[in-house]
Image (cartoon, rainbow, N blue to C red):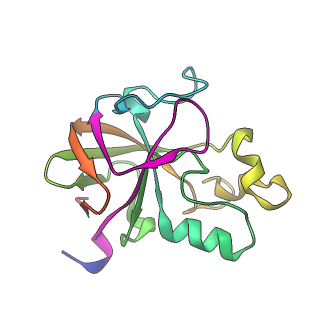
């Protein structure tokens, strides 16, 4: 595998609703995402086509370098990965997590006002795919459930 198509899980995020998502060392992934994870607005977030919100650690670090007070989990990410070229993580791409879990990217996420405090001047549009292509988080569906752990290998499959 190319260096830009493999990496690892930096953080798994979980909450009882809302942001930030708090780090857990391992999680069971089912058709609806991290088992037990909740959303404050399930009519907008979650469901089989948006089971997991995934983002790159490298993007978070770059946002911090721009002066945004963002940190891992602040943007509602269930999964923060590192080591994979984020520009390759597009709708239709598949991510293999560890030995068991397989995800498929379904769409770019639309940022909402609940993450406004984590951006300088409330500019949460900074991670809008429409305004800043390549900076959006992504939603995924779960093709194969299983257990994942922080540090597990992540491989981009296409």
Which quadrant of the view contains residue 141? top left
> Where residue 28 appears, x then y in whole percent?
27, 37
Q: Is residue 91 magenta?
A: no
> Which of the image's four quarters has the N terminus?
bottom left
> Which of the image's four quarters has the C terminus?
bottom left
Determine whether, in the image, residue 119 is placed left or right of residue 32: right
> Seen from this angle, which residue lies furthest top?
43
Q: Nearer the viewer, residue 54 or 17?
A: 17
Identify the residue at horizontal 70%, vertical 59% (top origin): 126
Using the image, determine if residue 15 lies above or below residue 153. above
Using the image, determine if residue 138 lies above or below residue 153. above
Identify the residue at horizontal 60%, vertical 24% (top origin): 41
Identify the residue at horizontal 76%, vertical 48% (top origin): 116
Q: Nearer the viewer, residue 77 or 84?
A: 77
Q: What stretch of residues is rendered in magenta? A: 4-29
> Seen from this angle, which residue lies furthest left?
99
Q: Is residue 5 magenta?
A: yes
- Magenta residues, dominant SS class: strand
> Where residue 12 appears, x then y in whole percent?
40, 50
> Seen from this angle, which residue lies furthest right?
121
> Where residue 49 appears, x then y in whole percent?
39, 31
Determine whether, in the image, residue 26 is placed left or right of residue 39: left
Determine whether, in the image, residue 122 is placed left or right of residue 13: right
Number of marks drawn: 0
Using the image, determine if residue 124 lies above or below residue 64. above
Q: Nearer the viewer, residue 111 or 97?
A: 97
> Where residue 56 appears, x then y in whole percent?
47, 63
> Seen from this angle, which residue lies furthest bottom?
3
């Amino acid at each position: 595998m190319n260096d830009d198509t493999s990496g690892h899980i930096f953080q798994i995020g979980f909450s009882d609703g809302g942001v930030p998502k708090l780090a857990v060392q391992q999680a069971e992934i089912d058709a609806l995402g991290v088992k037990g994870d909740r959303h404050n607005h399930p009519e907008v977030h979650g469901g089989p086509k948006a089971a997991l919100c995934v983002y790159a650690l490298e993007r978070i670090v770059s946002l911090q370098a721009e002066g945004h007070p963002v940190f891992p989990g602040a943007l509602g990410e269930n999964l923060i990965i590192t080591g994979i070229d984020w520009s390759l993580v597009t709708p239709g791409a598949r991510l293999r997590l560890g030995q068991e879990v397989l995800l498929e990217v379904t769409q770019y996420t639309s940022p909402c006002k609940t993450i406004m405090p984590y951006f300088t001047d409330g500019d949460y549009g900074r991670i809008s795919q429409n305004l800043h292509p390549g900076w959006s988080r992504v939603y995924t569906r779960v093709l194969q459930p299983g257990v994942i752990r922080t540090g597990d290998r992540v491989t981009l499959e296409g």
